[in-house]
Image (cartoon, helix red, strand yellow):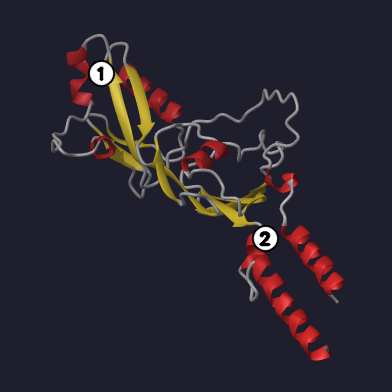
Amino acid sequence: MSRYSFFLLLLLLLASCATKKDVLYFQDATNLNLRNLNYSNAEIQIDDIINIKVTALNEESVKPYNLDNGVAPNTSLIEVLKFQGYLVSKEGTIVFPILGKINVINKTTSELENQIQKILIDGDHVKDPTVSVRLLNSKFTILGEVNKAGTYTITENNLTVLQAIGYAGDLTINGSRKDVLIIRSKDGIQQTKKIDLTKTDWFTSEFYFIKQNDVIVINPNNNKIKSSGFLGSASAVMSAISLVLTSILIVTN
């Protein structure tokens, strides 16, 4: 009976162990050389806050086209930037100084830069203007088996899923590298994509870079799921079996 219990406990230990294939990232990344990454500027959506800066050699000529709001001295940098930005209305427009309403919905930041620059030139508003557009409230949410789950505000135009995971302090040992879910909303339509972090085949997909308001869900691995069951962890299972076997030995003797 003792020999039987030993082998049974050994099998339980082996079954509860994770292998390298479950933990290591990018196991197929031998001499990887990607050339077709889907770089893209962020598309502007309703309720976005965008900062627009117009510059030119003649600084006085562009002052009427730039916001210059006074801000409290103790205000944080991100709050300052938002206060000096334009909120995109439900109609997808902003009210720009002198130029009036401008439709910005679903335009990339670079497309809006070109549009405003063209209006300023064609209307003889400013000579040789340069326009810079930046999203101020771009954010993503990461949930599940990471060290610091939450919603993060970013200023980068192109942030990868890997960088987003880095913001959250990487996956915990209980996170499934093979079962990462990305939820994306565009024009009222929800899209989902599952990626496997042990592989690199998703690097050239449209989900390599995150988008505004993406949600990344790190699902638990099998060991974590098993440990949340009735008997709990493997050690608890072994304790229960040991108790049963001990009881049997007492009764039979």
**Which residue is outermost to the front?**
253
Categorize mark 1 by other alpha carbons within 10 Å: few (<14), some (14-19), many (20+): some
On-image quarter of the N terminus = bottom right
From where the camera sits, is residue 8 visible?
A: yes
Relative placement, left or right, of 187 versus 101 is: right
Categorize mark 2 by other alpha carbons within 10 Å: few (<14), some (14-19), many (20+): some
From where the camera sits, is residue 116 visible?
A: no
Q: Regarding mark 2 in the picture, which secondary structure is present there?
A: helix
Q: CA distance from mark 2 to mark 1?
A: 65 Å
Label ID, residue 223 = 2
Residue at image coords 29%, 21%: 54
Q: Could you say which quadrant of the image residue 68 lies in?
A: top left
Residue 41: give x, y in percent of width and height: 49, 31
Residue 192: give x, y in percent of width and height: 61, 52
Which residue is under mark 1? 125
Residue 224: give x, y in percent of width and height: 63, 61
Residue 187: give x, y in percent of width and height: 50, 49
Residue at image coords 75%, 28%: 30
**Which residue is outermost to the top?**
57
The amino acid beneath tag 1 is His
Which of 238/131 is in front? 238
Q: Could you say which quadrant of the image residue 116 lies in?
A: top left
Which of 43/229 is in front? 229
Q: Could you say which quadrant of the image residue 36 lies in?
A: top right
